[in-house]
Image (spheres, rainbow, N blue to C red):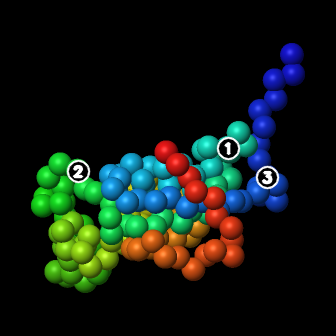
Amino acid sequence: MNNVTYSAKKSEVERKWYIIDAANKPLGRVATEAAKLLRGKHKPTFTPNIDTGDNVIIINCKDAKLTGNKLNSKIYRHHSGYIGGMKETSATVMMQKNPEKAMMLAVKGMLPHTSLGRQMATKLRTFAGSEHNLQAQKPEIWNF
């Protein structure tokens, strides 16, 4: 019985590029798929303490749907660090003005809240429309 657990090394990781089309799909469902790809959980070589994930391009963020009453009740908050520096933006405004940021925040919240998670988040690219400037990477379409 030679049951040895495989542990990936940083130099052995092969990265691919994937495109996810968010048009007419719930924002959270798209974000979970993107987080799975960024972490590398879809690979048999997944190792929790190594960044084994792939690069992800999310297009059509402006067409992603928020289910239920989230469009009216969800609020995005951030703080400047100064007294009284709390800024609030409703989901309606965020989806109109900056849908890429809404998608980015949803995916980032599903990644580990460590330096490894921040490193994984750098491999995510979001675009409001269907056009992107990353054709040179020859991305594959990811269907879910």
Q: Is residue 127 above or below residue 49?
A: below
In this picture, residue 46 sits left or right of residue 13: left
Residue on which the image places disc 1: 43
Secondary element type, mark 3? loop
Which part of the image, by quadrant, shows the N terminus?
top right
SS of the residue under disc 1: loop
Q: Where residue 87 sits: x, y (%)?
A: 20, 77
Q: CA distance from mark 2 to mark 3?
A: 40 Å
Please name whichever residue, 80 or 12, is drawn nearer the observer in this view of the structure. Answer: 12
- CA distance for labels 1 and 2: 30 Å
Viewer-side label of 2, 3: 2
N-terminal label among 1 and 2: 1
24 left or right of 123?
A: left
Identify which residue is drawn at 39% across, 49% down.
29
Q: Quickly name the residue at label 3.
A: 9
Residue 46 position by quadrant: top right
- Identify the residue under disc 2: 67
Which of disc 3 and disc 1 is earlier in sequence? 3
On the image, the x and y values in percent for residue 83 come to 20, 82
Tag 3: residue type?
Lys
Query: What residue type is disc 2 on?
Result: Thr
User: How busy is the neighbourhood of tag 1: few (under 14 within 10 Å), some, or many (20 plus)?
Assistant: few
Q: Nearer the viewer, residue 66 or 141?
A: 141
Q: Residue at x 32, y 64 (%)?
A: 63
The front one of 47 and 42 is 42
Residue 47 locus on image (x, y percent): 68, 45
